[in-house]
Image (cartoon, rainbow, N blue to C red):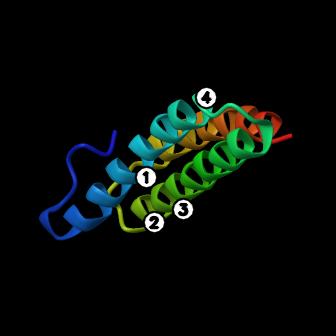
Amino acid sequence: MLNVMPKGQAVLSDQLKRASISIPLNIAEGSGKPDGPDRRRYMAIARGSAMECGAIIDAARILGAATPSDANEAKVLLERIVSMLSRMCR
């Protein structure tokens, strides 16, 4: 989807990569925590990274780096991820 961005949008692509990899890394780190509050904090951080990905995808669509259909597909998947993470934060 967003792999081929115009040269001037490399920063946007890099930010999306960093935010998206932050999601599973925080889930993994939180899963290794022994107590609930610490674990929930990492899930909340992962959820924040997913929300950041959504904002980046919106920006990519506006800038023409992602097609509307690709952006919509990505947002549907992110909504599911955010929903799951929200339940894990409880």
- Residue at horizontal 20%, vertical 47%? 4
Residue 9 appears in which quarter of the rendering?
A: bottom left
Real-space Cα distance between discs 3 and 1? 11 Å
Mark 3 Cα-neighbour bin, 10 Å: few <14, some 14–19, many ≥20? some
Kindly indicate whether the residue at mark 2 contacts the one at mark 3 (C-beta within 8 angstroms): yes
Classify mark 1: helix, strand or loop: helix
- Residue at horizontal 57%, vertical 34%? 27
Classify mark 4: helix, strand or loop: helix
For badge 4, the amino acid type reads Ser
Q: Which mark is nearer the camera, 4 or 3?
A: 4
Which percent across, then down, holds residue 67?
41, 48
Sequence-wise, the earlier of marks 1 and 4 is: 1
In the rendered image, which residue does mark 3 sit on?
Answer: 55
Sequence-wise, the earlier of marks 3 and 1 is: 1
Real-space Cα distance between discs 1 and 4? 19 Å
Which percent across, then down, holds residue 14?
27, 57
For the N terminus, the image quarter is: top left
Real-space Cα distance between discs 4 and 3? 26 Å
Mark 4 Cα-neighbour bin, 10 Å: few <14, some 14–19, many ≥20? some
Sequence-wise, the earlier of marks 4 and 3 is: 4
In the rendered image, which residue does mark 2 sit on?
Answer: 59
Q: Which mark is nearer the camera, 1 or 4?
A: 4
For badge 3, the amino acid type reads Ala
In the picture shown, does residue 58 fall above or below 76?
below
Which percent across, then down, holds residue 70?
45, 40
Mark 1 Cα-neighbour bin, 10 Å: few <14, some 14–19, many ≥20? some
For badge 1, the amino acid type reads Ala
Q: Which mark is nearer the camera, 3 or 2?
A: 3
Real-space Cα distance between discs 3 and 2? 6 Å
For badge 2, the amino acid type reads Ala
